[in-house]
Image: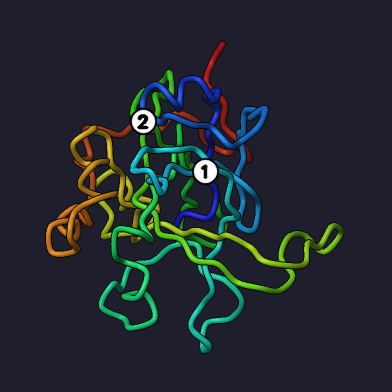
Amino acid sequence: MCNLYSMTRNQEALRRLFRARRALTGNLPALPAIFPDTMAPIVRIGRDGDRQLELMRWGMPAPPQFGRLVTNIRNTSNPHWRRWLLPPNRRLVPATSFCEWTDRKQKVTHWFALDTDRPLFAFAGIWAFLRGTRGPAANPVKGLHYVYGFLTTEANAIIAIHAKAMPVILTMAEEWDIWLRAPWAEAVVLQQPLLAEMLRVVATGEKSDSAPD
C-alpha cells in the first residue's frame, strides 16, 4: 500500500503536461515526500470544462470500521466508495515517484519511477469533502476540507517483490481524459497494474525522493 510519494516538478511542468488552463496552487514547491494528511496538487475539470490545478489534502473519509482516513482505495464495489466514482469526483494526482516498503519485519523503503529522471505521471484519484479537524497534531486545521485518495490494484512483478498492491498509474493523455470524463464502465478498465517493464527502482532506504540535478 502506497502511503508515501513524491512530486518534484514545478507548476508550469504540471500545467503543460496535463493541459491545465488554470493553476490555483500558488508558488508550488518541490514535494519530495508527501505523507498522508498533507496538501498536494491534483488536476480536476473545472465548472467551465477546463482542467485546473488545485491543492487538496491526502486521505479520504474511511468507512466507520476502518478508522479516520484512507489513502488507497481498491474495493470500488464497496458502497462507501461507489458514490465518489462518477466523473465529477475523479481527479488526477500528479507524481514523479512513489514508495513501497519491503513487507518484512525490517522494513526498507523502495522508490519507484518511470525512469531515473523521474518523469511525471498520474495516479487515478477520487475526492470528497468533509468537516472537522485535519492535519498534524502540532498544527491542526479546522473547517471544511477537500480531500483525495487514489485507486490501487494488484501488484505487478517488480512491485510484488516488496508489496501486495500498487497504485493505479496513468501515463498517457488518453488515459487521463478517460479517467476524468468517461462513464465508470469505461474508466474502471484503467484499474489494472502498470506493466512491470515501465517501472524501475530509483532509490532504496530513503525517506524522500527527488529528481537528480
Q: Nearer the viewer, residue 135 or 142?
A: 142
Counting residues from the N terminus, which is met first, the one under dot 2 or under dot 1? 1
The relative height of residue 188 versus residue 118 in the rendered view (above or below) is below
| Left or right for 69, reference 192 | right
Residue beneath the point at 31% across and 81% down: 78
Q: Amino acid at mark 1?
A: Tyr
Q: Nearer the viewer, residue 177 or 199?
A: 177
Residue beneath the point at 56% across and 56% down: 58
Q: Please tell me the numbered disc located at residue 120.
A: none
- Please, which residue is most extreme toward the bottom here? 65
Q: Nearer the viewer, residue 48 or 164?
A: 48
The relative height of residue 158 versus residue 22 in the rendered view (above or below) is below
The relative height of residue 89 versus residue 66 in the rendered view (above or below) is above
Q: Please tell me the numbered disc located at residue 5.
A: 1
Across and down, in percent, residue 139 comes to 84, 57
SS of the residue at dot 2? helix
Q: Quadrant of the N terminus?
A: bottom left
| Left or right for 206, reference 53 | right
Q: Quadrant of the C terminus?
A: top right
- Please, which residue is most extreme toward the right here? 138
Residue beneath the point at 54% across and 25% down: 11
- Please, which residue is most extreme toward the front here? 48
Quadrant position of residue 96: top left
Quadrant position of residue 126: bottom left
Q: Please tell me the numbered disc located at residue 18.
A: 2
- Please, which residue is most extreme toward the top here? 213
Across and down, in percent, residue 107 comes to 55, 54
Residue beneath the point at 52% across and 35% down: 204
Q: Amino acid at mark 2?
A: Phe
